[in-house]
Amino acid sequence: MKKKLIQQTTEHFEKIIHKSPDYIFLSPGRINIIGEHVDYNDGFVLPAAINKYICFAISKNDSSDCTLIAKDLNEAYKFDLKDELKPIDKMWANYILGVLQQLKEKHGLIQGFTIVFSSTIPMGAGLSSSAALECGIGYAMNKLFDLSLTKEEIALIGQKSEHTFVGVNCGIMDQFASVFGKKNKVIKLDCNTLEYQYYNANFKKYSLLLLDSNVKHTHLTSGYNIRRQEVEQGLKIIREHFPIVKTFRNCTEEMIHGLKEKLGDVIFRRCHFVVKEIQRVLDATTALNNSDFKKLGQLMSETHHGLSKEYEVSCDEIDFLVDAVSNEKTVLGSRMMGGGFGGCSINLIEKGSEKELVEKVSEQYRDAFGIELKAYKIKISKGTTLYKN
């Protein structure tokens, strides 16, 4: 799959530019093993880069003219780096332009280039193709023009591009995982300080399977904003009664239970989920250290119950996919992954059982919703990298 992507991207470049690219880069999508909706609640997340990539074929030129070619979309955008870069009506180009504008301002980027890119990261499945695009461009420019950027700076530039040129107020997890990923390692990331630690994630006789619901409900953004307001309100009430609490990180389950009446049912459930999920991430790192995959699977399933019943960011389709595998002996754990209201479930299952499981669940899902299920078997891979020059 990776070789085919590189070959097709390179051939497309050669067909259009009539020469071989100077450089080939690969930038991966990401998963999050556990730690959902805690990035903005002072918790930890446990992401990893995966073997689904955007491939970039790039050559510099002798002018300030730039050409971006999105092979999969059959679209292109040309501009002059000397001009002020602003968001345009091609959304895919904005992820790139937002990165380039920052590099122009800070590093005086003026030399032009041609880029052809193509992807095996499924769009809209919650695997962060946008972060892969931003970080791939940042990484490539750093290499092409010797900008001496650190990996952390590349991730932050990607995040800022999304804030300023795309208008999505995302956290840092996606970009960080895309740049810092290592093969068979997950990253425990503190989204506040950007301190991080790698944990072994060689699943041996188990594998990770994503089941894509093929739905994206429109209340993702509104639901996300409301949840943020609810937990902020909850934390304010908790602090009034327990001044020692600075963040959810030093708030206990006992404190939440003691304030159940004052918080009210909805805010109690939101806060209870956050406190439990922060702890589950820590428990998951212990499980990984001990190669205790049954425990990891159990934690994933507990997270889904919390996301569905306490944080209420799941949906009927994802709940169905999680329920459909809950009694399968080959499945250790399953949960909704990402912001919610659609996207994928992530499943930890026995190797060799994937095909049979996908066939069974696909049929049930089709019968229930009339929707074709997509499945992606994934491996944990290294982060953004130079493939060749």
Image: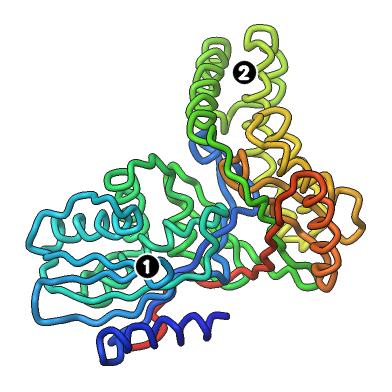
At 67% across and 37% down in the image, what residue appears?
314
Q: Residue at x 39, y 88 (%)?
A: 11
- 122 vs 209, left or right, is left
Q: Are marks 2 and 1 in contact (CB under 8 Å)?
A: no
- In this rendering, the answer to whether 214 lies above or below 150 is above
Q: Which amino acid is tagged 1? A: Gly
Q: Quadrant of the C terminus?
A: bottom left
Q: Is residue 105 visible?
A: yes
Q: Which mark is residue 136?
A: 1
Q: Residue under circle 2?
A: 267
Q: In terms of depth relative to the viewer, which is nearer, 103 or 112?
A: 112
> Outermost residue, front direction?
370
Q: Residue 196's x, y, as percent?
A: 50, 55
* Percent of width and height locating residue 210: 68, 59
Q: Relative to 295, is 133 on the left or the right?
A: left
Q: Report the number of discs.
A: 2
Closer mark to the observer between disc 2 and disc 1: 1
Using residue 110 as the reference point, say whether residue 76 is left or right of it.
Answer: right
Name the residue at 57% across, 71% down: 51
Q: CA distance from mark 2 to mark 1?
A: 39 Å
**Quick one: label 2, few (<14), some, or many (20+) residues within 10 Å?**
many
Along the viewing direction, whichever of 8 and 289 lies nearer the viewer: 8
Residue 27: quarter of image: bottom left
What amino acid is labelled 2 in the image? Ile
Q: Nearer the viewer, residue 143 or 329?
A: 329
| Local crowd size for mark 1, using a 10 Å CA cut-off: few (<14), some (14–19), many (≥20) | many
